[in-house]
Amino acid sequence: MKLICFLFAVIFLCGSAKPYREIDLYDSTGNAVAFIDDYITDQVVYLWNGKPVAYLHQNFNNTDVYGFNGKHLGWFEDGKLRDNAGYLLGETKEALGRITSDVPMKGLKDTPPEQKFREQEPPKPYFSDLWSSTSASDYLPTGRDN
């Protein structure tokens, strides 16, 4: 009887747990630049080296990107990460729609810092299909205090 209860508990817990996955983001040349840990409630955005730089926040019909310092950094919609001006910073392989380079090994994920009070998101700009002149690896760390 104890074995049946144990098996039932294991099946229940495994069936109700959210599957773990990471969403890889690529730059305009198809190089891996960042990834989103899609396991945590506020999904954390990491640079490829494992440094946490931002997180996603669901806001009515938007998915906003915030730095841990509370600064609004952009939006993540339809597999596209955009800055506050509406320019592309990164895309999923599916959104990019072309061959990507060989993906190097990801760095070990650092512990995300504490989230500060979020500033009000700016008005949503026109979303351009042009890439930002600033790379994701330079832009996203502006959401950290250190």
Image (cartoon, rainbow, N blue to C red):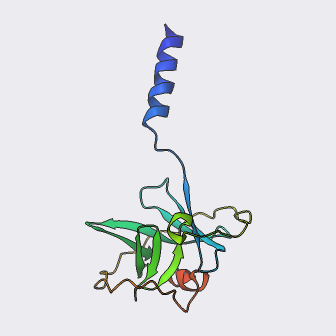
Q: Is residue 65 above or below residue 146?
A: above
Labels in figure, total = 0
Look at 36% across and 75% down and name the residue there. 117
Percent across and percent down for residue 59 are 29, 68
Q: Is residue 115 left or right of residue 101?
A: left
Q: Is residue 132 above or below residue 14?
A: below
In the picture, residue 123 is in which quadrant? bottom left
Could you say which is closer to the camera, residue 89 or residue 47? 89
Q: Is residue 119 left or right of residue 34?
A: left
Asked whether the viewer can see residue 18, the reply is yes
Q: Is residue 10 above or below residue 29?
A: above
In which quadrant of the rendered image does the C terminus lie?
Answer: bottom right
Residue furthest out toward the top: 1
Look at 55% across and 52% down and name the residue there. 21
Look at 46% across and 44% down and name the residue there. 18
Percent across and percent down for residue 25 are 57, 69
Percent across and percent down for residue 89 are 52, 80
Could you say which is closer to the camera, residue 145 or residue 31? 31
Percent across and percent down for residue 69 are 45, 79
Residue furthest out toward the left: 60
Asked whether the viewer can see residue 70, the reply is no
